[in-house]
């Protein structure tokens, strides 16, 4: 599903939302959100102050050498979401696109996170 927040378009993975089997119990499946910027909105788009309202598990995956969103910024995002909901991971020798620069690490981190 695609949604718009102001001028920012977001893609939200809605396949299988809700409860899924996890052994003898059920658990909530996390939602994956990928941002797509169109015209430089990222310079003014600031969610700080509202990240603590996130209720579902979040994976913050960052490249150690990211020139666009430094790992320190990802750490600040993770801290604001809170350790009870957020799993931060900084990938060494990696730039902005973890899944492109180090797919064996980035894709496995995403698979493991979604699997729970």
Image (cartoon, grey):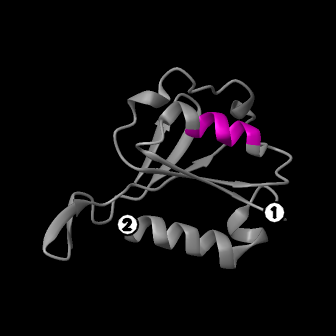
Verify whether residue 74 appears in magenta: yes
Residue projecting furthest to the left = 24
Report the residue at 13% width, 74% height from top. Answer: 24
Q: Which residues are magenta?
A: 72-78
Report the residue at 74% width, 70% height from top. Answer: 100
Q: In screen coordinates, is 98 left or right of 49?
A: right
**Dominant secondary structure (helix, strand or loop) of the stretch shown in magenta:** helix
Q: List the residue tagged with mark 1.
A: 94
Residue projecting furthest to the top = 49
Q: In screen coordinates, is 75 left or right of 55?
A: right
Report the residue at 14% width, 68% height from top. Answer: 25
Secondary structure at badge 1 equals loop
Image quadrant holding the C terminus, namely: bottom left
Q: List the residue tagged with mark 2.
A: 116
Q: Relative to residue 49, is residue 66 depicted above or below?
A: below
Q: Position of residue 71 (x, y in %)?
A: 75, 45
């Amino acid at each position: 599903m695609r949604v718009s927040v102001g001028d920012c378009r977001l893609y939200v993975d809605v396949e299988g939302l809700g409860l899924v089997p996890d052994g003898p119990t059920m658990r909530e499946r996390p939602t994956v959100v990928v941002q797509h910027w169109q015209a430089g909105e990222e310079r003014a788009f600031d969610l700080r102050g509202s990240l603590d309202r996130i209720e579902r598990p979040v994976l913050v995956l960052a490249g150690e050498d990211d020139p666009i969103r430094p790992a320190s910024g990802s750490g600040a995002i993770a801290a604001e979401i809170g350790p009870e909901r957020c799993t931060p991971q900084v990938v060494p020798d990696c730039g902005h696109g973890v899944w492109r620069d180090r797919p064996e690490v980035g894709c496995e981190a995403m698979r493991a996170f979604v699997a729970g």
